[in-house]
Image (cartoon, grey):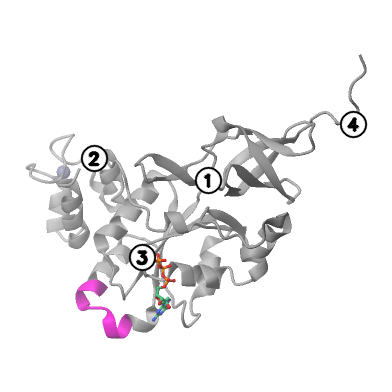
Amino acid sequence: MTENLSHPASTAPENGQIITRFGADFLVETADAELLRCTARRKLDHLACGDYVQWERQAQGNAAITAMLPRRNVLERPDFRGRLRPIAANIDLLIVVASWQPAPIWETLDRYLIAANRLPADVLLVFNKADLRQSLASAEAETCLAEYQRIGIPILHVSAKQQQGIHPILEAIQGRTAIVVGQSGVGKSSLAMQLLPETDIRVGTISETGEGRHTTTSATLYRLPSGGSLIDSPGVRDFGLTGMDFATLETGFPEFRPFLGECRFHNCTHNHEPNCAIKAAVAAGQLPPRRFARYLSLLANI
Ligand SMILES: Nc1nc2c(ncn2[C@@H]2O[C@H](COP(=O)(O)OP(=O)(O)OP(=O)(O)O)[C@@H](O)[C@H]2O)c(=O)[nH]1
Ligand SMILES: [Zn+2]
């Protein structure tokens, strides 16, 4: 029997990265930086923006994702049924945005830091609305902020509205893949607009595929002209921390590390136990007390 030559056989698999999702299909950036719409089998439904995949051209002329390559990490969020769904994968940097109006919820910031540690991903704390800092930041808030500085969390003060401090964020991203998170109203969308100002970055590259304006709420990966990538994901912006266990909580407080192992009990929770090295360090002024108080409050909730 002769082969049907009108349909070329499928090609060898190639590597690519998922840029975004359109319903059941995915937009894949090929190794040649070409954007290609690909189908995927149902068993690959858990693929997310940022995933590296293998794809191949099919006999029918379309392209299909055939496999997911190993992930460094994945950010998940419960859907309306409470099932965890992947939002974005292979994240290097969690940009946690806070502001002075709405005022920072410090425990929420701590939760983001714990989540970043669990991913694992680096953290950049961006305090937006710097224009309001002088009039709205209380002395207590400044003290809380100083504690983060003290434990070595990188912090930037910016104003999306006044277009100030945007370049340092891009510099901080360097070659990494970053995602912006933070509570509602802190200015995440405003910042994303500043970080991705060119319409051709935000929507243009996506439009080339004939989708028109990309109006879905799917996470989308954008290449930054300054290097690195930014995943813009309306859905993940206020993501929480689900299923936290004690180990996740404890390692989410990196300032504890030098003292861990020095408590009298190896399974010390740094709460009621006698001869606790963490409590001693807090009492001696070696660990920031407000962070420790919030640690105890988080501990009470697991
Ligand atoms: N004063 C001041 N206001 C800002 C700044 N950046 C954003 N805003 C305002 O803050 C409000 C919220 O901004 P958004 O960018 O929508 O905040 P968001 O974090 O994306 O909010 P959600 O979509 O609810 O998660 C808007 O009214 C912005 O104009 C800033 O630097 N200074
Ligand atoms: Zn202890």
Q: Tell me: residue 244, above or below residue 101.
A: above
Q: Earlier in the sequence, mark 3 or mark 1?
A: 1
**Which mark, residue 6?**
4
The part of the image, by quadrant, that contains residue 141 is bottom left
* Residue in the image at 55% along x and 67% along y: 170
| Gap in angstroms between the C-alphas marked 3 and 2 | 27 Å
Residue denoted by label 1: 90
Left or right of residue 122: residue 294? left
Residue 62, given in percent of the width and then of the height, sits at 75, 39
Amino acid found under the numbered disc labelled 2? Phe
The part of the image, by quadrant, that contains residue 57 is top right
- Taking the magenta stretch, the answer to whether it contains residue 139 is yes
| Gap in angstroms between the C-alphas marked 2 and 4 | 60 Å
Q: Earlier in the sequence, mark 3 or mark 2?
A: 3
**Which mark, residue 246?**
2
Q: Earlier in the sequence, mark 3 or mark 4?
A: 4
